[in-house]
Amino acid sequence: MVRKLAAGNWKMNGTGASLPEVEALKAALSEPSVDVLICPPATMLSRLSDALDGSAIVTGGQDCHAAGSGAHTGDISADMLRDAGATHVILGHSERRTDHGESDADVRAKAKSAIAAGLRAVICVGETLGEREAANTLSIIGGQLAGSVPDLVTADRLVIAYEPVWAIGTGKVPTTDQIGEVHDFIRAELEKRFGSGVGRSVPILYGGSVKGSNAAKIFAVSNVNGALVGGASLKAADFLPIVEALQAS
Ligand code: PGA
């Protein structure tokens, strides 16, 4: 049984002026039947965690350093995220892989550190348009999974997000067949590596231009256990219909 998850990734958006959006989510989702996660910028993490205290909505970081502490100007450790109230951390988002040159090995080291600190790692994988057009999607995803996901994970410490790079922030969404093919593949890879117990319990999220208007269709696809939502997570009015579609799926 996989627990479903609706996750919002605010990216580099949000200040104190965004807190009313979180209050609105808290008011509307007093007893959600799915897990709900918001990952604001690090500067907002404590404030969101405080605002959501006593609610079912949890918070997460968008990245962490692989080391526990030390001379790494500008970086944030997994322990610091925990201290700020986070329960999750997004790792290996394609924007980190592209903007900061993060490799699978980097993501794996960060995930190890996050899991050791008691966080749940939301590890992102996804192909570029060129890789899809060259029919390399599954081999790219397989390589990213093998390289980015550490050994010895338990299902409650891992979430996989499939985010085709070409679908992020573009309004372009793969067909349901394309999503299903990749999600079934990820499920099979997880079962092969971690056994059916863990392999069947890790949530696999789809991400890339998810909106209220396409969410129900995406959530009906096999092995889609939720969404990682960027743009449509910034406003409660846009995010709530996605959470509702997941609850209804
Ligand atoms: P988007 O971003 O929903 O704005 O396409 C998704 C993501 O990058 O997680």
Image (cartoon, helix red, strand yellow):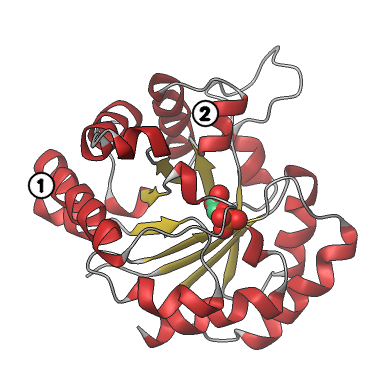
Q: Residues within 10 Å of mark 2 (few under 14, many from 20)?
A: some
Count of numbered circles in the view: 2
> Could you say where residue 161 lies in the image, as x and y percent from the top left?
40, 50
Kindly check if marks 2 and 1 are in contact, taking CB atoms under 8 A apart as contact: no
Residue at position x 69%, y 15% in the image: 72
Residue at position x 74%, y 81% in the image: 24
**43 on left or right of 190:** right
Q: Quadrant of residue 232?
A: bottom right
> Could you say where residue 143 lies in the image, as x and y percent from the top left?
26, 29
Quick check: can you spot residue 74? yes
**187 on left or right of 204:** left
> First in sequence: mark 2 or mark 1?
2
Kindly give the residue lying farthest to the front in the view shown: 133
**160 on left or right of 40:** left
Above or below, comparing residue 237 to residue 82 in the picture:
below
Q: Which residue is mark 2?
A: 97
Quick check: can you spot residue 87? no
Residue at position x 37%, y 38% in the image: 127
> Could you say where residue 25 lies in the image, as x and y percent from the top left?
68, 78
Q: Quadrant of residue 39?
A: bottom right
Above or below, comparing residue 244 to residue 111 in the picture:
below
Front residue of 50/246: it is 246
Q: Which residue is mark 1?
A: 195
Above or below, comparing residue 219 to residue 98 in the picture:
below
> Could you say where residue 183 lies in the image, as x and y percent from the top left?
25, 55
Q: Is mark 1 within 8 Å of ligand 1?
A: no
- Viewport quadrant of the C terminus: bottom left
- Viewport quadrant of the N terminus: bottom left
Q: Residues within 10 Å of mark 1 (few under 14, many from 20)?
A: few
Front residue of 2/92: it is 92
Name the kind of residue labelled 1 in the image. Gly
Q: Quadrant of residue 109?
A: top left
